[in-house]
Amino acid sequence: MLVNIAVYDCNNVHLLETCNVIKLCCPVTCKITQYTNAETFLNDLKSADSAVFDLIFVTVSKAGSTDVTLAKKIKKLCPWTQFIFVADNYDFVEEIFAVNPLQFLIRPIKKKMLSEAIQAGIDNINNRKEDTFDIISKNHFMRFRYSDIKYVESYLRNIVIHEKNKNTEIVMKLDDFEERAPHNFIRTHKSYLINMDLVKNISNNHLELFSGEIIPIAKIRYPQIKKEVLTYLGIPLNP
């Protein structure tokens, strides 16, 4: 696993010190990008096509409010971002926690605390990947909870994600969505991927969801699909 880390500090000496400690403490391979200029940092994030950083370290200087303001701007651009703040004292701790940081570290940085903070960030990344589906581009960011998705339908060159309260069309192949989906999703037809947790009944040519929607089943795949759905739901198969 590669963890992308950004480190912001307007002091070059402190920046290098922090980066060196991170390299020593990171339990996995990490790529570190350094920033001393807030405007450059924000511009890089605005121009990014995808999620750039998994963790962002922000050093709080004497002008701490400026650094916290930067973190708030980043949070708006990248809602998924996890922050670890580094400071010499607790002067701006209340402002910092408004950004919901992963950890707040006092310099000199204790390696044990830093290692634990980075590991917590990695755990959050893995949990997020299991629970949510993120779409990120230059112009927008969308997040879907897999548990809210009833089924996904292929439509021309796009897919339509059918949630409990809305439908969203995005540019993607159904095969690509299927690769990222958790194990409770099953392909019933070349054009349909359904959430098995929401299946009400199954017959020879279709599934019915609790929402009342009817999803077709490819005839040739019916026996295997029935077996997989019943096994997943914990329902005994007929002898």
Image: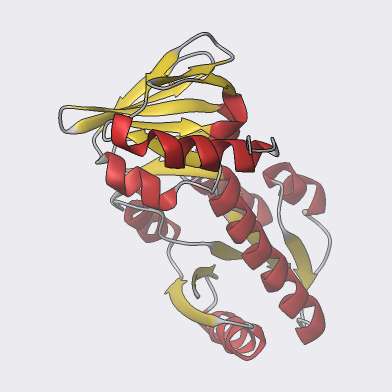
- Vertical side of 53 occupied by 217: above or below: above
Position of 162 compared to 24: left or right? left
- Residue lying at the far right of the rendered structure: 90
State the residue lying farthest toward the front. 239
Q: Identify the residue at horizontal 71%, vertical 54% (top origin).
A: 101
In the image, residue 83 sits, relative to residue 31, either above or below, namely above
Nearest the viewer among 178 and 82 is 178
Quadrant of the rendered image containing residue 168: top left
In the picture, measured across the screen, residue 157 lies left or right of residue 148, that is left
Q: Nearer the viewer, residue 97 or 230?
A: 230
Q: Position of residue 46 (x, y in %)?
A: 34, 47
**Residue 209 percent coordinates (x, y):** 53, 17
Which residue is more in the foreground, 133 or 217? 217
Can residue 139 be seen here? The reply is yes
Q: Image check: 146 left or right of 35?
A: right
Q: Where residue 165 appears, x then y in whole percent?
A: 52, 13
Q: What residue is drawn where x is 73% and y is 69%?
A: 117
Residue at point 45%, 58% (across, down): 38
Q: Nearer the viewer, residue 27 or 191?
A: 191
- Name the image quarter holding the C terminus: top right
116 lies above or below 203: below
